[in-house]
Amino acid sequence: MKMVVTLLCLWAGLAFAGEQPALPAEVEAILSEPSAQSDYAEEERCLPIHRIREIDALDNRHVVFRMSRKALYLVQLPHRCPGLRRNDPVAYETINGMSVCRHDAIRGTFRYGPGDTRLGPPCAIPGFQEVTPEQLAAIREALRQGK
């Protein structure tokens, strides 16, 4: 029997102070191409649920799992995930119930009114790429600027 665990987390953004004159090369590389499984050089296959502190949707293709202040994992979806938006809750579904793994799913949410929130379709997680807080800040800024 398939165990499905769903957790809703509200987006809690990082304060980004100052302007970034140009994107660092590694951030440019992260954002320049749709990621495939092979692009996750330092890929984690699974993240233990008990260590996940929050999940931030950066846009409809990028999600960050925050494990601690400095342990951050970026998920780049190959296509946009309907319902996945900045400042909205993100849900995840996992088969084993103990960790979120590659090929598990994240879901955006649709709000239809007070107290009426529904989950969007599942979007498969291709992998988790560890990023630094500085890279995350640059990625956030690049996405805000439409890069």
Image (cartoon, grey):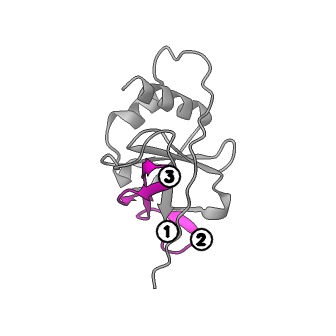
Residue at label 3? 90
Which residue is at 42% across, 58% downward? Answer: 119
Judging from the image, what secondary structure is the residue with disc 2 in?
Answer: loop
Q: Residues within 10 Å of mark 3 (few under 14, many from 20)?
A: many
Residue 94, disc: 1
User: Which mark is in front, 3 or 1?
Assistant: 3
Name the residue type under label 3. Val
Quadrant in which residue 28 is drawn: top left
Three-letter amino acid code of the residue under disc 2: Met
Secondary structure under the numbered disc 1 in the rendered image: loop
Q: Is residue 131 left or right of residue 26?
A: right
The reply to whether the C-beta atoms of the residues labelled 1 and 2 are less than 8 Å apart is yes
Residue to which mark 2 is pinned: 98
Question: Looking at the rendered structure, which numbered label has been put on residue 86?
Answer: none
The span from disc 3 to disc 2 (Cα, nearest Å) is 18 Å
Residue in the picture at 50% in, 49% down: 114
> On the picture, is 101 further left or further right than 126?
right
Seen from the viewer's position, the closer of residues 59 and 96 is: 59
C-alpha distance separating marks 1 and 2: 8 Å
- Give, as a three-letter code, the residue at label 1: Thr
